[in-house]
Image: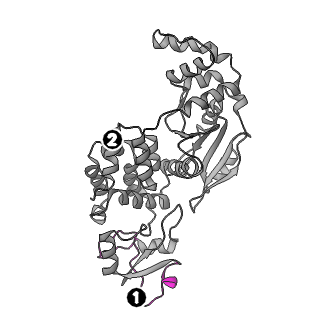
Amino acid sequence: MGIAVAQRGFDGGAGIGSDDRAASSRRGNSGVPSWVRADAPSGISPKRALAPNVTVLSRATSLSLRSRHLLRTPLIPKAITGPSAVQLSRLFTTTTYKALAEGRGAKVVKSILSDCECLSQYRGMPIRAVYDEAYAGLFAGYRNEYVFKNEITKRILLGKHSLRTARLLSEFWIKDVKVDVAVINGTSSAYEIKTDLDDFDRLSRQLARYSLVFDRVYVVTSEVISDSVAKKIPGHVGQVVLTRKGSLSTRKEALSNRGHTDPDAIFQSLRLSEIEDIGEAFGVQRYAGPNLHRRRHYLNSFRQMEPAQAHQSMVDVLRKREIHGAQLELIKGAPDSMKHLCLSRQLTVTGYRVVAEALDARL
């Protein structure tokens, strides 16, 4: 009996077909993850037994390579679903990320893997490899909100823009609605995510709120629900689909909305320091009183702006939001599965460095 190992990574969609998934779910006595296919008979060509770009290795060779971490790409992921997927998703939460920053990462990661009854499969692996392999399984079978956010971060912010001139917003409130992801470069683009796990009850209100502040508004969905969503979005809102292969495909371009934004809503969404910077740029004298009165001091000036002018002022100050050098180094060195997590969560300088070291620790 041999063990089949993929020779390519999981960049979005490098996965296996339904027949392979069914076969790979059967675990032998080798102790390797259940999503490594272990039923390819010896003597059968790799192409016939599995798929192109897949090679059958002996069990001893495969485990030796794995134990020494000489494999340069993840093993073929099984589509992780159900309770195991929910448990593994905890790897990508703020709570676990903070645990990494506090030096408790290995303990928390082991606890999550134990809850999934798969800790033994990851013994000796660097934490960064655990994250990438878990993400591959979630991508194949449980595309939750984090998966969508991470793909937007990788493919749009980091793939098309530069952190020298662009910023990502993930904790940005517009009245009673929190934006899923927004990218600020020369203009502003907001992305509302609807996974196969979501309903559409709040979609109209969310898009209406986004349109008060952002120039271009998109809904990001899977291929499964793309047609249903297309019927529910207004004319100026665009649609992006995360395909089965892992690309972000623009099905409908968003129309520019900056001339229809609301200066009042923009004002309420910004930090006080950003409001003061805008006010100073327009010649408004700084106010040294209590914070509540300081915001009121600048409100009238904002209300006198044209929508496009208020929007551009917002873009200018948001692009200046600081990213510390330690965070930039962490983002650069982090595995692809953690790009959004490392970019969207703020830590101390020491915290960023502790996370960077934790990723290379072995379980």
Q: Is residue 124 magenta?
A: no
Task: Determine whether the residue tagged by mark 1 lies in a helix, strand or loop.
Answer: loop
170 over 74 or under it: above or below: above
100 over 79 or under it: above or below: above
Residue 353's mark? none
Residue 351's mark? 2
324 to the left or right of 311: left
The percent coordinates of residue 79 (x first, y second) are 46, 63
- Location of the N terminus by quadrant is bottom left
- The three-letter code of the residue at mark 2 reads Gly
Q: Is residue 36 magenta?
A: yes
Name the residue beneath numbered marker 1.
42
Residues at marks 2 and 1 touching, judged by CB atoms closer than 8 Å: no
- The three-letter code of the residue at mark 1 reads Ser
Q: In the rendered structure, which disc, 2 or 1, sits on the residue that comes first in sequence?
A: 1
* Furthest residue toward bottom: 43
Q: Residue at x 49, y 35 (%)?
A: 171
- Highlighted range, magenta: 25-51
* Quarter of the figure with residue 57: bottom left
The percent coordinates of residue 282 (x first, y second) are 63, 18
Q: How far apart in space, not on screen, are marks 2 and 1 (Cα)?
A: 49 Å
Q: Main secondary structure of the magenta part?
A: loop
Query: Residue 313 or 293: which is nearer the viewer?
Result: 313
324 over 334 or under it: above or below: above
What is the crowding at mark 2: few (fewer than 14 residues within 10 Å), some, or many (at least 20)? many
- Location of the C terminus by quadrant is bottom left
Task: Determine whether the residue tagged by mark 2 lies in a helix, strand or loop.
Answer: helix
What is the crowding at mark 1: few (fewer than 14 residues within 10 Å), some, or many (at least 20)? some
Q: Residue at x 60, y 13 (%)?
A: 284
Query: Residue 205 or 201: which is nearer the viewer?
Result: 205
Q: Residue at x 53, y 12 (%)?
A: 286
Q: Residue at x 55, y 21 (%)?
A: 277
